[in-house]
Image (spheres, rainbow, N blue to C red):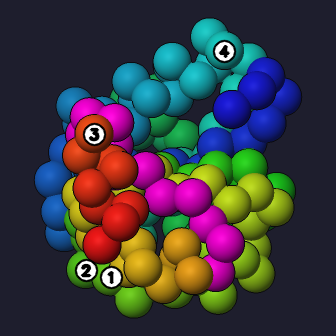
Amino acid sequence: MKAGQKLAILGATYKADIDDARESPAGLLVEAAKKQGIETAVHDPLVKAGNHHGLIVSNDMPGVLKGAAAAALLVEHCAYRSLSAKFFGDHMTGRLIGDSRYWLNHASLRRSGFTVVVLGQSPEAQTRIAQT
């Protein structure tokens, strides 16, 4: 990603299906993105919208994805399981998805023209996954 682009972050909690944003890895990603000049927006379906320990959280998924060059799924909330390639395509401008939990339907996303990266895996593992 380049400075000036937007990254949508999905999941503001430290584990699935809870509403506690304390110690969230999303905060680390927001800070790293800011240092690169990348705009961020954070969505969580369970955390109340607002400021949580410095992390601004929204419950408006289309709004968080609007204009995003990339999206990063950090938490495997059940609500994210049904996210489709069409949904991402309808709301994002870019076609890059990072999935830290291998929670999304990668084959469907790739067929729809998205590049999918499993965050936290080596490039060799990425290549093996992409070929399946």
Amino acid type, label 3: Glu
**Residue hosting label 4:** 36
The answer to whether residue 73 of the structure is visible from this angle is: no
Q: Is residue 30 left or right of residue 101?
A: right
- Sequence-first tag of 3 and 1: 1
- Sequence-first tag of 3 and 2: 2
- Which picture quadrant has residue 87? bottom right
Residue drawn at 64 percent across, 81 percent down: 112
- Which picture quadrant has residue 46? bottom left
Q: Which numbered disc, 3 or 4, marks the residue closer to the eye?
A: 3
The answer to whether residue 88 of the structure is visible from this angle is: yes
- Sequence-first tag of 4 and 1: 4
**Residue hosting label 2:** 78
The location of residue 30, given as percent across then percent down, is 51, 29
Tag count in the figure?
A: 4
State how far apart marks 3 and 2 are (Cα): 29 Å
Q: Which numbered disc, 2 or 4, marks the residue closer to the eye?
A: 4
Q: Secondary structure at mark 4?
A: loop
Tell me if label 2 and label 4 are in contact, CB under 8 Å. Answer: no
Q: Looking at the rendering, in which quadrant would you find the C terminus?
A: bottom left
The magenta-colored residue range is 112-123
Q: Which numbered disc, 3 or 2, marks the residue closer to the eye?
A: 3
Amino acid type, label 1: Arg
Q: Secondary structure at mark 2?
A: helix
**Residue hosting label 1:** 81
Residue nearest the observer in this picture, 37 or 109: 109
- 87 relative to 66, above or below: below
The location of residue 20, given as percent across then percent down, is 22, 50
The location of residue 41, given as percent across then percent down, is 62, 46
Tell me if label 1 and label 2 are in contact, CB under 8 Å. Answer: yes
Tell me if label 3 and label 2 are in contact, CB under 8 Å. Answer: no
